Image (tube, rainbow, N blue to C red):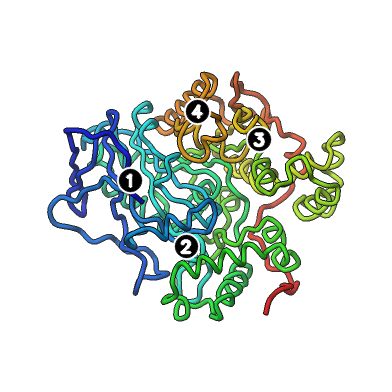
């Protein structure tokens, strides 16, 4: 990546971190520090290893450019960004602070980006933390973590969930260093969307993450957590693309680009392996967190129901029309056939009579709506709702929201689709790819809604109350974010009832044979 685009300033703020002194930049009243190593590059002898503490440096280190992206899936040109990088400093962190004074004691918000666990870079313009930090009076932190094969493939001889371990290392860096940037290490909120939301949920269940944050915001978490058998089978298929075994010995000297390409190849062919890999093959999801004894012993829902992270305040929610953007990208928006809807219902709806219950719960729905609602429910909406209900089942509190404001961009065809919350929460309504959902020239309506969401997120980070009542199993009150926000009973009750008795467990490996295995 190139150096951050910023307004030149006569003042170059400096802070003393544990590894050495950093010199950042001043941008629109916010001190910004980019590309700070929080762990050693996971290459060479550290390839596929748990993250190791970063070495210190002498003198003053410039912190004005983002760090190198980790290897990426070939989607939206992300692999090109990684390929053009000049070094292998994959694990770096960035800080935006309105008051870089060790005595400021500001709340801290640590963002975990999404990207289906296969791609994502903290330097994307939609994740710029300047506006959120300045308007909310918080310190905003973003960082890179390993994705795809490097971060989530189950490799013999390597720890599972290396991407999650990177996230824990970043949070440990925040604990040890954020005071120097004006943050309070005792008031850390971790927040993320999509795979980032799933990561936040996973951190709630990971013993190694205990005590590193006191509040959590989970936005549109995916319900995909893999059993070790399923993850191992997918890893074997990825390695077989290169004529190798899924071991550290075989893969540690392999070019990261080739490994990413192998992961892409398996992802593209997954639809032919539904009999063996189940719904994730239908949805083309090759990587997700693995439920393993050492790092992530149980699913987030089970962990919260058992009382884990009971001292962590929780805010969780989703968008109304999660699936619609994916249907558009697949070229099927408005063109879903009855056969395609039937396939989705049979693969994704819970229980032996799930398809019938969807038709009964949505009697006027045609193929497009049935396809959209069952995909939205299976991947994002019901996993998010069940996380809140798991917390409540253990006697805890959770605040729930739903974004129902229809995106005006692209002719208004996408509704409140997946990812729409990202530009609204950060306030970056005209930057990055998600800005296309907002449309050219953000309207006053969009600006007002963004201000409301940013105020709710920063209020939650500051004192644990986003501004509406906690969810319970009687009234089921949630905050709807729309042109006229309101607090009302959870509006997706038909879906809730269909999934009421479902348990989100680690996804298993079936007995079917991959149709294209060689």
Which dot marks residue 414?
Answer: 3
Residue 461 falls in image quadrant:
top left
Q: Which of marks 1 and 4 is nearer the N terminus?
A: 1
Q: Can residue 472 be seen in this view?
A: yes
Which dot marks residue 453?
Answer: 4
Residue 194 vs residue 300, the one in the foreground: 194
Q: In this view, does 345 lie to the left or right of 475?
A: right
x 33%, y 36%: residue: 139
Q: How far apart are marks 2 and 1 (CA)?
A: 20 Å
x 13%, y 56%: residue: 58
The residue that disc 2 covers is 151
Q: Nearer the viewer, mark 4 or mark 3?
A: 3
Q: Which of marks 4 and 3 is nearer the N terminus?
A: 3
Question: How many other residues sit within 10 Å of disc 3, few (<14), some (14-19) or many (≥20)?
Answer: many
Residue furthest left as drawn: 59
Percent position of residue 332, x then y: 74, 46
Residue 123's place in the image compared with 147, above or below, is above
Q: Which of marks 3 and 1 is nearer the N terminus?
A: 1
Q: Which of marks 2 and 4 is nearer the N terminus?
A: 2
Task: Tell me, yes or no, whether the two marked residues, 1 and 4, touch with CB atoms within 8 Å.
Answer: no
Percent position of residue 476, x then y: 66, 30
The residue that disc 1 covers is 94
Quadrant of the image containing the C terminus: bottom right
Q: Distance between the residues labelled 3 and 1?
A: 32 Å
């Amino acid at each position: 990546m190139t150096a951050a685009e910023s307004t030149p300033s006569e003042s170059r703020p400096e802070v003393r971190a544990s590894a050495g002194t950093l010199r950042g930049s001043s941008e629109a009243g916010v001190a910004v520090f980019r590309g700070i190593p929080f762990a050693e590059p996971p290459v060479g002898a550290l390839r596929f290893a748990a993250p190791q503490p970063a070495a210190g440096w002498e003198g003053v280190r410039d912190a004005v450019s983002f760090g190198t992206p980790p290897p990426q899936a070939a989607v939206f040109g992300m692999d090109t960004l990684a390929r053009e990088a000049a070094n292998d400093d994959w694990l770096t962190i960035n800080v935006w602070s309105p008051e870089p004074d060790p005595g400021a004691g500001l709340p801290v918000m640590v963002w975990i980006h999404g990207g289906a666990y296969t791609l994502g870079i903290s330097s994307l313009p939609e994740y710029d933390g300047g506006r959120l930090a300045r308007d909310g009076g918080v310190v905003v932190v973003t960082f890179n973590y390993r994705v795809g094969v490097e971060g989530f493939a189950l490799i013999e001889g390597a720890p599972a969930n290396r991407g999650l371990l990177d996230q824990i290392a970043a949070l440990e860096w925040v604990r040890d260093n954020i005071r120097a940037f004006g943050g309070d290490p005792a008031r850390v909120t971790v927040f993320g969307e999509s795979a980032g939301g799933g990561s936040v949920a996973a951190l709630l269940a990971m013993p190694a993450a205990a005590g590193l944050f006191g509040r959590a915001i989970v936005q549109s978490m995916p319900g995909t957590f893999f059993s070790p058998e399923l993850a191992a089978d997918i890893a074997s298929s990825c390695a077989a693309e290169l004529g190798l075994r899924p071991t550290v010995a075989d893969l540690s000297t392999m070019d990261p680009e080739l490994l990413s390409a192998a992961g892409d190849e398996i992802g593209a062919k997954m639809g032919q392996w539904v009999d063996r890999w189940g719904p994730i093959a239908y949805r083309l999801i090759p990587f997700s967190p693995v439920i393993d004894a050492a790092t992530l012993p149980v699913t987030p829902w089970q962990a919260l129901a058992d009382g884990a992270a009971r001292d962590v305040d929780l805010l969780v929610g989703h968008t109304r029309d999660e699936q619609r953007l994916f249907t558009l990208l697949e070229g099927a928006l408005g063109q879903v056939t009855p056969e395609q809807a039937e396939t989705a219902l049979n693969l994704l709806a819970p229980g032996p009579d799930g398809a019938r219950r969807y038709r009964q719960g949505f009697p006027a729905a045609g193929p497009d709506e049935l396809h959209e609602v069952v995909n939205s429910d299976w991947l994002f909406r019901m996993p998010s709702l069940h996380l809140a209900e798991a917390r409540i089942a253990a006697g805890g509190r959770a605040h729930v929201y739903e974004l129902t404001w229809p995106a005006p961009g692209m002719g208004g065809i996408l509704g409140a689709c997946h990812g729409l919350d990202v530009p609204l929460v950060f306030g970056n309504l005209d930057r990055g790819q998600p800005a296309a959902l907002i449309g050219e020239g953000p309207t006053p309506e969009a600006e007002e809604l963004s201000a409301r969401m940013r105020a709710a997120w920063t209020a939650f980070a500051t004192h644990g109350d986003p501004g509406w009542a906690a969810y319970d199993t009687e009234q089921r009150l949630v905050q709807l974010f729309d042109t006229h926000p309101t607090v009302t009973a959870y509006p997706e009750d038909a879906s809730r009832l269909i999934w009421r008795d479902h348990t989100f467990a680690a996804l298993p490996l079936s007995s079917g044979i991959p149709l294209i295995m060689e």
